[in-house]
Image (spheres, rainbow, N blue to C red):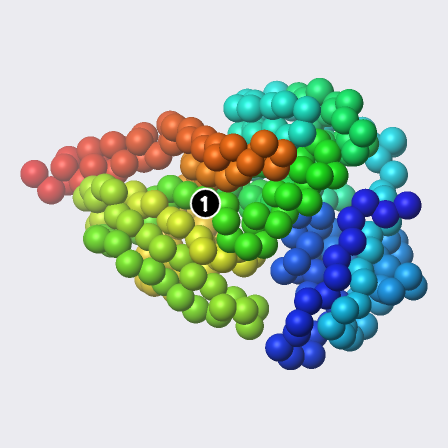
């Protein structure tokens, strides 16, 4: 039994199925590791046959995904803030420090049955599923599908870049105004818009900038990479910034705003959450320390 099919559209260049699905099936497999595991489980079909990750695609090929059995999932009893829920979808707040999905027990996906009601729609998913991904260290708003129709429609909105996402980050140094960062990530073009909203003196970094980041594409670690390339890495990022890393406070990146169309009613919906308290606490602490040693 399959729960989603994709017909390969016109291709500008030769592409392997795994690379195609990294872009076009993020709503089903939100991470590269989950996609690789799907191939190992033989859960991906190409024109009716079991697909191999290295198979080449042609226009018109049909890719199908075998329904995964979720009856044996161990529910993770983690309390989540639920911003919205109906029979088709939900909007929850992901705390930092938890992976959205993966071969782990303590994931947001395993916590969803603890926080959400199962849908009674005809096309209900066995369990609610995230339709996009946030890094383990990133907190913020996460969209959840409870039916196949919602999963498909929300996934299409992500693919077509209809969904508006806004993150807030604390970055090292002074970064004023608004502009964009554009550079390829994993050989795919990526674009991030940014706007500075607050700058404070810092004893540790000379300056700290609080800024809004609006990704126009959805590459893995895009915001972290782009900020690092700009010379203003996100505070707490020990992967793309190895100098003077703040220990014990986590990554200062929060997905705090999202706007999208409801997958059934097409109503325009938007949600915004306040920044985690650690943002203001760090800004105040760094300014206080700077004044102490510079007055």
In the rendered image, the quadrant that contains the C terminus is top left
Between residues 68 and 122, which one lies in front from this camera angle? Answer: 122
Q: Position of residue 183 (x, y in %)?
A: 43, 69
Q: Which residue is mark 1?
A: 164
Q: Position of residue 48 (x, y in %)?
A: 91, 61
Neighbour tally class for label 1: few under 14, some 14-19, many 20 plus, Cα within 10 Å: some
Q: Is residue 161 above or below residue 231?
A: above
Where residue 80 appears, x then y in whole percent?
A: 59, 24
Identify the secondary structure beneath mark 1.
strand
Taking depth in this image into account, of 100 and 10 the one nearest to the observer is: 10
Q: Nearer the viewer, residue 9 or 118?
A: 9
- Image position of 231 (left or right of 56): left
- Would you say 218 lies left or right of 293 here? right
| Residue at position x 73%, y 34% in the image | 147
Q: Could you tell me residue 150's position as x and y percent? A: 67, 37
Q: Residue furthest bottom?
A: 13
Give residue 46's quadrant in the image: bottom right
Residue, x 40% and y 66% (percent of image)? 182
Mark count: 1
Q: In the picture provided, is 152 more to the left or to the right than 278? A: right
Image point (87%, 39%), residue name: 69
Q: Is residue 275 visible?
A: yes
């Amino acid at each position: 039994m399959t729960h989603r099919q994709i017909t390969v559209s016109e291709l500008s260049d030769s592409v392997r199925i795994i690379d195609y699905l990294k872009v076009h099936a993020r709503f089903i497999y939100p991470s590269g590791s989950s996609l690789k595991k799907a191939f190992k489980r033989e859960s991906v079909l190409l024109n009716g046959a079991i697909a191999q990750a290295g198979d080449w695609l042609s226009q018109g090929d049909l890719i199908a995904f075998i329904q995964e059995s979720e009856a044996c999932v161990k529910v993770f009893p983690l309390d989540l803030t639920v911003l919205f829920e109906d029979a088709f979808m939900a909007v929850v707040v992901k705390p930092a420090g938890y992976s959205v999905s993966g071969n782990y027990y303590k994931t947001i996906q395993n916590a969803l049955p603890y926080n959400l009601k199962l849908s009674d729609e005809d096309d209900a998913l066995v369990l609610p599923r995230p339709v996009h991904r946030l890094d383990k260290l990133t907190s913020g708003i996460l969209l959840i599908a409870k039916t196949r129709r919602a999963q498909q429609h929300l996934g299409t909105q992500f693919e077509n870049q209809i969904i508006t996402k806004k993150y807030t980050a604390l970055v090292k140094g002074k970064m004023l105004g608004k502009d964009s960062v554009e550079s390829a990530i994993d050989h795919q073009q990526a674009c991030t818009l940014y706007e500075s909203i607050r700058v404070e003196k810092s004893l540790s970094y000379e300056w700290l900038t609080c800024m809004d980041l609006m990704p126009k594409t959805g590459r893995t670690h895009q915001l972290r990479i782009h900020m690092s390339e700009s010379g203003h890495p996100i505070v707490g990022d020990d992967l793309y910034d190895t100098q003077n890393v703040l220990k014990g406070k986590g990554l200062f990146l929060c997905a705090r705003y999202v706007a999208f169309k409801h997958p059934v009613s097409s109503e325009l919906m938007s949600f915004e959450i306040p920044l985690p308290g650690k943002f203001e606490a760090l800004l105040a602490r760094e300014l206080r320390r700077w004044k102490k040693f510079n007055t």
